[in-house]
Amino acid sequence: MNIPSHTELQKIMRLMRSIVFPDYYPNRDFSDQILRGLLYSQLSTVMCRCQSCDKSNSECVGAVADRFIQSLPELTRLLHTDVEAALHNDPAVTSPAEVILCYPFVTAMLHHRTAHCLLQLGVPLLPRMLSEMAHSETGIDIHPAATIGEYFCIDHGTGVVIGETAIIGHHVMLYQGVTLGAKSFSYDEEGKPLNLPRHPILEDHVTVYSNTSILGRVTIGHDTVIGGNIWLTHDVPPHSRIVQQKAVEAPSFANGEGI
């Protein structure tokens, strides 16, 4: 049985990094044909034998590899909007180089946008492997099927979770520990969970602060700010400001009563 190679997928992502950010990650060995060859090899381990069409497996795998290569300019453009979002939103940033070389969300988004493109091309398994590689490296967990718009930024990043059917608009900012998750599941007659839309929709220009959980198929309207440490399971209209109640100050407590 052929299985994908983590080592080869890592090579693919190193080449992707050089394509998107050539000034910061130069690679003399790069060419479209080298990337295509590596991608073709890994696609061949997971794609079907084309029983549903009249092409050979090699023709189908080659077509997918070619379509991915054709998508590189758009992937590059999207990732540069993400870098620009960090420059716009984080006063601690001093230069594009600092974002590209130091910010973990750039690695997470490089993997996500690559994985999402492959998933849209009908590739099984590899997109999820790419997402989990980024998850292991950055602590940011984004399902490859999640739809994320332009100028997206995650500050700090650790602990962010974005579920499979989440839809994120343009100019959205998340902070560490944010979860865009499901509240509940529907099941079929055999008791198996149905893959239905179950994660939030964040419209354009939404900011979500740290450790907030937004759960279920709810819509957060555009130009909304969601404060930190909030549990949110309902729709929010545009231009909203959602904050938690103030902490209650207790005069004293002992023996773990404040936990």
Image (tube, grey):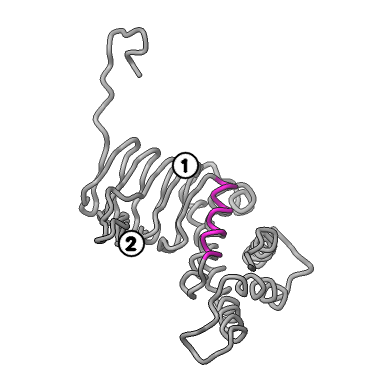
Q: Is residue 142 above or below residue 250?
A: below
Instruction: Pinpoint residue 230: horizontal percent, then vertical percent.
Output: 30, 38
Task: Give SS at disc 2.
Answer: loop
Residue under label 2: 195
Left or right of residue 43: residue 205: left
Q: Considering the whole magenta stretch, tell me its main secondary structure.
A: helix
Q: Is residue 101 magenta?
A: no
Badge 1: few (under 14), some or many (20 or more) residues near its Cα, within 10 Å? Answer: some
Q: Earlier in the sequence, mark 2 or mark 1?
A: 1
Residue located 38% across and 45% down the image: 179
Left or right of residue 202: residue 56: right
Instruction: Pinpoint residue 13: horizontal percent, then vertical percent.
Output: 64, 62
Q: Which mark is residue 148?
A: none
Q: What segment is highlighted magenta in the picture?
A: 125-138
Q: Amino acid at mark 1?
A: Gly
Residue located 68% across and 72% down the image: 35
Residue located 69% across and 63% down the image: 8
Left or right of residue 192: residue 235: left
Residue located 48% across and 88% down the image: 53
Q: Which mark is residue 159?
A: 1
Cα–Cα span, label 2 and label 1: 24 Å
Q: Quadrant of the N terminus?
A: bottom right
Return the residue found at the far bottom: 54
